[in-house]
Image (cartoon, rainbow, N blue to C red):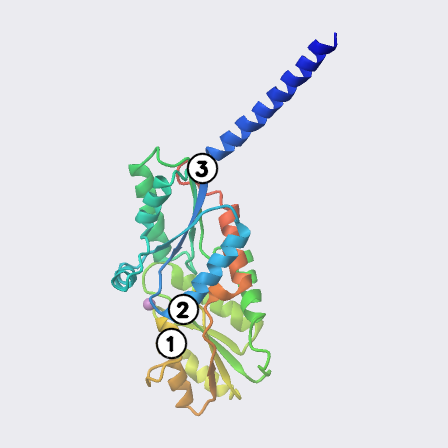
Amino acid sequence: MRQPRLLRSLLLALFLVCQFCLASLAQAAQPSGIVLVAFGTSVDSAQSSLMDMEEAYAKAFPDTPLLWAYTSDKIRAKLAREGQKVFSVREALDECARRGLVDVRVQSLHITPGEEFSQLQRLLVRYVTLHPTLFDHVWLGHPLLESSRDLEEVLCAVMGTLPAARTARDAVVLMGHGNNRGPGDLTLACVATAFNTSDPRVFLATVEGGNGFAELVHEIEAQKPDKVYLQPFMLVAGDHAQNDLAGEDEESWASQLKARGLKVEARLTGLGSLPGIQNIFVRHTAETTDDLVHPAKIF
Ligand code: CO
């Protein structure tokens, strides 16, 4: 009597172990990866914000391979000449396929859902259409500012990291990018209003597009601030932050303010280095339901 019972127990144990192995295999058959998509930068000191972002992702998704893609052909070409290879979006997807990653999350590190994000979407849809069986899922994580919740969290992240030494009389000017194509400028206009409403001495203008700095200079001057803090409102503190914002050139925002007798201090930290901003991107990556392989019909 004893032996058959022992045998039965052994068989049951074996069965359970097999079930466990099969379940693990099923999971292992769905290897996932994350592709972080940024415009890119070739400015060495600006890379730190991208590295900070990478660290935040490594912490949030510890077992998921992380790939970078830069959308700027010019920057990729420049980096390649310096011996640094960075993928384009297409190349990053090719690499995911090569590694057998079939559940891919593509996170746009753009600030607004503007023209560059639209181009990314179009490129991804084209890729998935041309290679319909390559991936089980291609989840698209949307840019930093897409919802009211995002805006609230961005305000919190930026306002919470303003210099402790700032007095109530000091102004802050944030430099966004902006451009004349697509809807990005509207989002940035809304962000500018939100900052200025939460603190009438915090301003946002853009280096390109419709939210120019020229209109703001007089308003700032009229407030007679003791000091004006300058900060980029871009993922990295790259070329624009170093030259157009804080540069010595007389056209830079710092020079324009100094020419009006104002004291200026530039703080060149990209948004990608702020934990509050990293959290929003990570949330967008984790929570996206926008699967380009199986697009959901909402309407
Ligand atoms: Co630019």
Residue annotated with mark 3:
296
Ligand 1 is found in the corner quadrant, namely bottom left
Mark nearest the camera among 1 and 3 is: 1
Q: Would residue 8 be found to the left or right of residue 130 on screen? A: right
Residue annotated with mark 2:
46
Q: Quadrant location of the C terminus?
A: top left
Q: Quadrant location of the N terminus?
A: top right
The answer as to whether callout 3 falls within 8 Å of ligand 1 is: no
Q: Quadrant of residue 42?
A: bottom left
Q: Nearer the viewer, residue 267 or 263?
A: 267
Question: Does residue 77 lie above or below 246 as drawn?
Answer: above
User: Amino acid under label 2?
Assistant: Ala
The answer as to whether callout 1 falls within 8 Å of ligand 1 is: no
Determine the residue positioned at 41% across, 70% down: 237
Pointer 1 with pointer 3, Cβ within 8 A = no
Spot the residue most to the top: 1
Could you tell which of marks 1 and 3 lies nearer the N-terminus?
1
How far apart marks 2 and 1 lie (CA) works out to 9 Å
Q: Residues within 10 Å of mark 2 (few under 14, many from 20)?
A: many
- Image location of residue 180, percent across then percent down: 32, 64
Pointer 2 with pointer 1, Cβ within 8 A = yes
Q: Quadrant of residue 95?
A: top left
Determine the residue positioned at 26% across, 62% down: 74
Could you tell which of marks 2 and 3 lies nearer the N-terminus?
2
Residue annotated with mark 1:
242
Determine the residue positioned at 60% across, 25% down: 17
Q: Nearer the viewer, residue 215 or 124?
A: 124
